[in-house]
Image (cartoon, rainbow, N blue to C red):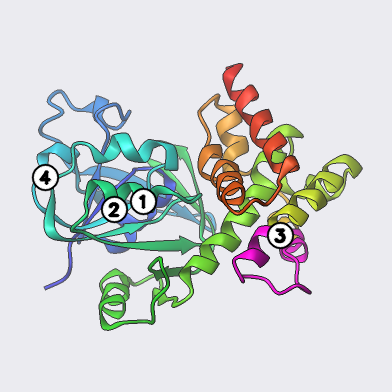
Amino acid sequence: MSTHWYILGAGAIGCLWAKWLSPNATLLLSPESNLIKQFQNPEKINPIVFSFEYQQQSEEISLPCALPQSIKNIENLLICTKAHQTEAALKPLSLSSSARIVLLQNGMGNQRLLEKHFPQAKVFCASTTHGAFRKNSQHIVHAGLGETYIGSIPDSSCSVELEKLTTDLDNPFEKIKADPQMEKRLWMKLAINCAINPLTVIHQCQNGKLIEAEESRRQLKIICEELDSMLRAKSFLSSQESCYPVIVQVIRDTASNYSSMYQDFLNKRPSEIDFIQGFFCEEARKLHIKTPENLEVLNSIKKIEASY
């Protein structure tokens, strides 16, 4: 029998995963979601038809949906909410004592939150490079192919349990990979987000513009130098390595993209800055590593959000 997954977070990535795992997946919707408003009785939610677009080809799929409080003893949970929405989204959940939780979101820090709320659950972290965005609440665009890796923090070898998890999440679209160095992968992704996302808001530009203008390029280099100090302290980079070339390549590869944080800014939504720059700066402080440029960026984004 196929494993059934409950997916918390009906954003672009959450909906994409619900499609990939269909029919063995249920989207858990926030009571405040616009998707709920189409039902006269929110306690009785019918499957919702979503349109998925990839390379200008579209298909419609009906996905089962439910309110989190209506499901008891969840065994398998995939969390795709925005990082800052996670704590509130967890409150109505009922998990079984043997539950598995996979955290798939930008930023870091929420693993500790999950371990606090659900100490008996097995918590895993995932990272994906697939690109997706919503044209509207029921139209999802799969904008770019990528890969998905899963592991645990602290790192462990690819145990039987982890291999079973990757098998349970395999789908017709991709084969999920286990990563025995998941913490390093997440820190490198955090570095990319720290370098790109907030600067696109500060300079109000697409990713590619960050390496074209002198001021943003100067900031980018300083941010990367501070990121390097932290990554070396954690033994994720050697003394001869830098994250700067990797981040520049990501910028070139996504030159026409608008970062998720910039999209939050355009829509006057709270961003995930506390789980990106905020997490990085706090972890650096614990190791007595100075990060003045990243702190300045963190404060700049907070001032921008306070002005909404």
Residue drawn at x 25%, y 77% is: 161
- Spatial distance from mark 4 to mark 2, Cα to Cα? 20 Å
**Mark 4 or 2, which is nearer the eye?**
2
Most distant residue in the right direction: 214
| Disc 1 and disc 2 in contact, CB within 8 angstroms | yes
Q: Which of 257 and 78 is in front in this view?
A: 78
Q: Distance between the residues labelled 1 and 3?
A: 24 Å
Say what amino acid the circle numbered 2 marks.
Glu
Q: What stretch is highlighted in magenta?
A: 228-250
Is 44 contained in the magenta span?
no
Which quadrant is home to the N terminus? bottom left
Secondary structure, mark 4, is loop
* Mark identifier at residue 71: 4
In-image side of 146 versus 121 (left or right):
right
Q: For the residue carrying disc 1, how many other residues have a C-alpha within 10 Å: few (<14), some (14-19), or many (20+)?
A: few
Name the side, left or right, on which 87 lies relative to 109.
left
Residue in view at x 82 percent, y 52 percent: 221
Q: Is mark 2 on a helix, strand or loop?
A: helix
